[in-house]
Image: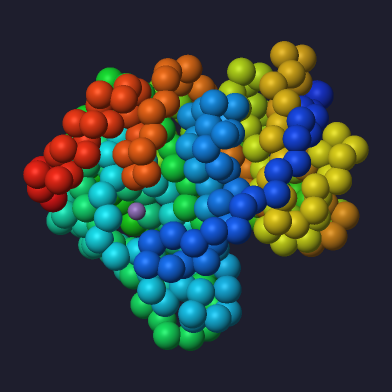
Amino acid sequence: MTSPVSHTESVNRSRAVEQLVIGQATSDGAGVTLTRVLTQPLQQRLDPFLMLDAFGSDDPDDYIAGFPDHPHRGFETVTYMVAGRLLHRDSAGHEGLIETGGVQWMTAGRGLIHAEIPQQRDGRMEGFQLWLNLPARDKMRAPWYRNFTAPELPSLLTEDRARVTVIAGVSRAVTGAVTRETTAPLFLDLHLPAGARFAQALPPEHNAFVYVYRGQIEIAGQSVPAQRMAILANDPVADGVVVEASVDARVLLIAGRPLREPIAQYGPFVMTTAEEIRQAVRDFNAGRLA
Ligand code: MN
């Protein structure tokens, strides 16, 4: 769904880069090698986002074990496949294959058990998983799930030949695959050819960051190399961000309205109080998440 419209988005003053972050190499699931880009110490700063994992390897030993049955409660997961095939199956009865360029959006809500299993024995697997918090009043809502193939995702082409996939939120009057009222998440994948400049309006109070996964970009004169997250300053006089690419680059741009609620996390459970976490563990142990 590429919109022919090339609505411009004017930004008078770009946010600056507040901090460059190198992710932490780790392993999760049954032994999947990944980089945790947004880690727990940044959860308050990047509220409503709780985690961003980047995975990418040509070596099946890094991904083949996948993520067998595990629970979640209290937030949403957004999985974006840059390359590869991953099967999702959960206890709420959802099943779907995420393939190259596809997105899976899962609201764990009150809880479910799910598995994410690679459907390839070799070749490249690359992608991201973003965790988006739910407001306290929605944490116990019913689970929800949608799978979007690459052609089903709204996208647009700018006058600079930048191709933008609008996974969530609104960019240049193109509404993304998913919208959420409370946190108003924006999730864009930018494919920028060398020389392209891309402007995105952002409310100053929304927390925002970019992650460069190919090439390199500049934001307000600061260079952001590949495999770096740049946290964008919440400047009351900045009305958005301007991303400039001097070489071909691919970049995630993610922003949202902070919830400003307490965050209590224990592994795959994210609630607002320690007692809610204890309840989640009791419910999981009693089989009530399945
Ligand atoms: Mn999971």
In the current view of this chain or complex, which residue is farthest to the bottom? 122
Number of numbered discs on residues: 0
Place of residue 204 in the rendered image (x, y in percent of width and height, measured from the top left): 66, 19
Front position in the image: 58 or 6: 58
Residue drawn 54% across and 58% down? 26
Question: Residue 280: which quarter of the image?
Answer: top left
Residue drawn where x is 36% and y is 38% of the image: 266
**As drawn, is 49 to the left or to the right of 222?**
left
Taking the spot 48% from the left edge, 85% from the top edge, the residue there is: 122
At a point 21% along the width and 47% down the height, the residue shown is 112
Q: Can the viewer see residue 129 in this picture?
A: yes
Identify the image quadrant of residue 16. Answer: top right
Give the x, y percent position of residue 15: 76, 28
Specify whether 209 is left or right of 142: right
Lateral position of residue 269 relative to residue 210, left or right: left
Above or below, comparing residue 7 to residue 161 in the picture: above
In the picture as drawn, the residue positioned furthest to the top comes out as 236
Q: Quick check: 130 above or below 33?
A: above
Colour pattern: rainbow
Q: Is residue 147 left or right of residue 57?
A: left
Residue 45: x and y, percent?
A: 60, 27
Instruction: Point out residue 53 in the picture as x, y percentages from the top left corner.
Output: 53, 53
Q: Is residue 174 visible?
A: no
